Amino acid sequence: MSRIAVVTGGTRGIGAAIATALKDAGYKVIASYAGNDEAATNFKAQTGIEVMKWDVGDFGACETALKKIENDFGPVDILINNAGITRDAMFHKMTPENWNAVINTNLNSLFNMTRPVWEGMRERGFGRVVCISSINGQKGQMGQANYSAAKAGDIGFVKALAQEGAKKGITVNAVCPGYIGTEMVRAIPQDVLDKAILPHIPVGRLGEPEEIAKCVLFLVGDDAGFITGSTISANGGQYML
Ligand code: CAA
């Protein structure tokens, strides 16, 4: 039986590419989404991938959804914590709502989603958790104190949990995309993108969502058990650690 993978924020952008790559590789995939029903319906029609709507910032909603997935399809062996939002603003203009929304969706979601599947992974002696962080969690980004804090937190979460999962056959890794050609990046003002971002990407272009999906596919494989607690940077050379 194929392993079951849940991809949060899996109907658009990087998440959609990950969900599709996992399905093409033979996994049973469930893609979550938070609000855009039309995009989710189209995604399901195009790919045949199951879609389910819930808020990854709400622990109870995550528990309920994951229970339903386990009842309907079986145990979740692979979790891709991908869902994320931006509320960019210079810090002197940032509101508590901007701060809390991003911390809740981009960081608290990792607890909300991983905690309900963790005990089952421990019992079965197998699990793959991949968290999609960001170059901006590694280097910090002006206009993104909230997002950079959350994405740096994602990396800390991965490093701690990787140590807990190691003896139970569970790997926990982070992928840090750079600027990828998705709606999120297209929302950046064009002059900022042209003047302040693109000139700093040595490969000279935005990344493709499929390039991130390939990193994830590698990490979730049954034969990737020695790779845990790692951070894969996929950013066109924009930031090197
Ligand atoms: N890198 C470097 N400089 C930047 C920058 C960036 N990413 N964003 C803004 N700046 C610079 C601007 O060029 C501008 O410089 P000048 O005064 O010399 O022209 C200065 O900062 C102020 O910017 P704005 O005039 O745009 O100020 P604002 O208050 O109108 O808007 C902002 C501020 C909302 C932060 C807006 O600039 C913006 O959206 N910037 C993009 C921030 C960004 O990089 N977000 C990443 C989104 S994609 C993502 O998050 C995915 C991922 O993981 C990589």
Image (tube, rainbow, N blue to C red):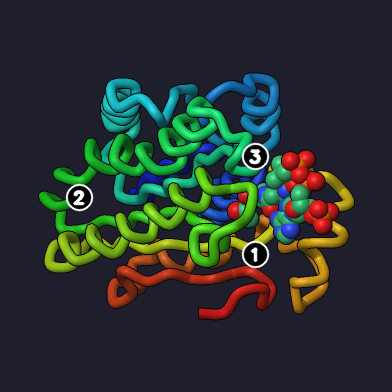
Query: Could you tell me how far apart the alpha carbons at marks 1 and 3 are, in whole angstroms?
Result: 28 Å
Q: Nearer the viewer, residue 56 or 171?
A: 56
Beta carbon at label 3 within 8 Å of ligand 1: yes
Give the secondary structure at mark 3.
loop
Which dot, 2 or 3, sits closer to the camera?
3
Looking at the picture, which amino acid does disc 2 mark?
Met
Can see residue 157?
yes
Q: Which residue is mark 1?
A: 211
Instruction: Tell which circle, 1 or 3, labels the residue nearer the N-terminal end.
Output: 3
Residue 68's place in the image compared with 75, above or below, is: above
Instruction: Tell which circle, 2 or 3, labels the residue nearer the N-terminal end.
Output: 3
Query: What residue sits 65% from the left and 39% below the top?
Result: 89
Q: Position of residue 65 (x, y in %)?
A: 34, 25
Query: What residue sits 39% from the left and 66% below the top?
Result: 221
Label 1 environment density (alpha carbons within 10 Å; few <14, some 14–19, many ≥20): some
Instruction: Tell which circle, 1 or 2, labels the residue nearer the N-terminal end.
Output: 2
For this view, does 192 lie left or right of residue 105? right
Q: Position of residue 120 (x, y in %)?
A: 17, 44
Q: Position of residue 146 (x, y in %)?
A: 50, 43
Query: Could you tell me how far apart the alpha carbons at marks 2 and 3 are, in whole angstroms?
Result: 39 Å
Q: Position of residue 91 (x, y in %)?
A: 58, 42
Looking at the picture, which amino acid does disc 3 mark?
Ala
Looking at the picture, which amino acid does disc 1 mark?
Glu
Query: What residue sits 38% from the left and 60% below the top?
Result: 155
Residue 117's place in the image compared with 42, above or below, is: below
Where, by quadrant of the figure, is residue 188 drawn?
A: top right
Q: Nearer the viewer, residue 98 or 157?
A: 98
Q: Nearer the viewer, residue 177 or 47?
A: 177
Q: Which mark is residue 89?
A: 3
Q: Which residue is mark 2?
A: 121
